[in-house]
Amino acid sequence: MIRPLLFLLSLLVSTANAQRPNVILIITDDVGYGDIGSYGAPDIRTPHLDRLAREGVRFTDFYANGPLCTPTRAGLISGRYQQRYEMEEPLGSASTKHGDVGLPVTGHSLPQLLKSAGYATALIGKWHLGYKPEYSPGAHGFDYFFGFKSGYVDYYVHTGGDGRPDLFENQQPVTVAGYLTDLITDRSVRFIRDHAATPFFLEVAYNAGHWPYQPPDRPSTARDNARHLMPHDSAPGTRADYVAMMERADQGVGAILGALDSLGVAANTLVIFTNDNGGEWLSRNAPLFNRKWTLWEGGIRVPTIIRWPGRIPAGQTTGQVGISMDLTASIVAASGAPVPSGAELEGIDLLPILAGRQPEVERSLFWRTATGRLNQKAVRSGDWKLLLDGPNAFLFDVRRDVGERQDQAAARTEVAGRLRALLAAWEASVDAEAKARRR
């Protein structure tokens, strides 16, 4: 009787696992809204991301939690506005004042919730949420980490902006030869193969297309790190370099999708593609205005695609407004992981909307940044967006005026006033929590 009982138990476990989807979250870095084929890119070939769009749902109005990498990643991992944790600016290198700070461990992070529910969890690629062990990916619930902790690294020699090596496997510094985009892809495919029999959560955080602009297969383009410290139009590189970097990342997506297909787990895998903020100077943000660092649409609206075969329809485009921390809520809901009351996730589960079981919902979303001598705040409520840019206030209907060219602050003062009040209430809430954490 023991063997039949063990067989039955194994069958029940296998059935339960089959009902819980694997989750792969792919994040690119500094990619423009118009840099993907399905978003109108004229010069970048992204057949694998375009495949995701054909087989899933493409968002037109999806936003990053912030205009820079650390803030958005903090919002994603915590599932809450990053201002509550005072993670509003990108962390510098480990040798700066930022070496001692990071995203606080709450026990309610996205990877921790899934790990507690029995998922194998991994982050492969960029972290940028803290250097010390107590802020590491492992402390937040990732079983496995391979990647780098700073904002950017040399793609070939894997050193950060301060010239120090920045490549880790879990907590151990490692030296691995290769172009970093390819290393991220290879480790991701390996993790999928090793965990195909059990539910897994894999975050694939490519550094493409973040500067330094070093295309693949040309190690001679590796330049002195000191020249990488200027992130804007003084950074070496061309659009052709950027295109090559993006196309190699797309090939990596193809390898990941191919692994799912070959292992027979694609049908039970939720795949999400997104980006951390608007594109930099070599990116194409059209038809949006401005770019990374700002709260204009070009700084925060990002390409996002979700595929879940048999659960959400293929080949659809949605105007549902979303934000990075919605992905947190959606992934947790799909996994069936219990959500403790203390988690207080602030995103919404988008999957019932994408599946057509619920209607689209109107959102009120908020942003704030003071990095790089900018002082900007913004709120989008419905189709209206109020942007406070220094002393100037702008009001746009971003559904009809996606390029933010027709300021209606003077004509629609009642709308501007309503949105100012929403923004003030949100600021009071996040600042009060941040202050309480400092006590």
Image: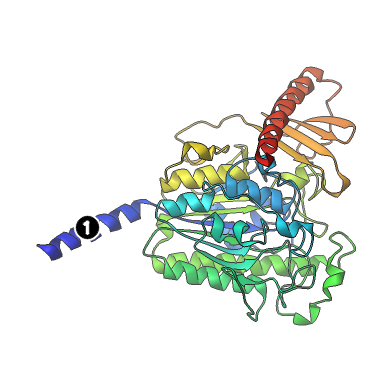
- Front residue of 54 and 425: 425
Question: Residue at left 49%, top 41%?
Answer: 351
Q: Position of residue 87 (x, y in %)?
A: 70, 47
Question: Pointer 1: what residue?
Answer: 9
Instruction: From this view, report whether residue 162 is shown above or below residue 102.
Output: below
Query: Dot 1: few (<14), some (14–19), or many (≥20) neighbours within 10 Å?
Result: few
Instruction: From this view, report whether residue 393 is shown above or below residue 199.
Output: above
The outermost residue toward the front is 439
202 sits left or right of 282 in the view: left
Quarter of the rendering containing residue 369 = top right
Q: Quadrant of the C terminus?
A: top right
Question: Residue at left 74%, top 56%?
Answer: 91
Q: How many marks?
A: 1
The outermost residue toward the left is 1
- Front residue of 179 and 408: 179
The outermost residue toward the top is 414
Q: Quadrant of the N terminus?
A: bottom left
Q: Is residue 349 visible?
A: no
255 sits left or right of 34 in the view: left
271 sits left or right of 373 in the view: left
Q: Position of residue 386 (x, y in %)?
A: 78, 30
What amino acid type should be assigned to the residue bearing mark 1? Leu
- Regarding mark 1 in the picture, which secondary structure is present there? helix
Quarter of the rendering containing residue 165 = bottom right
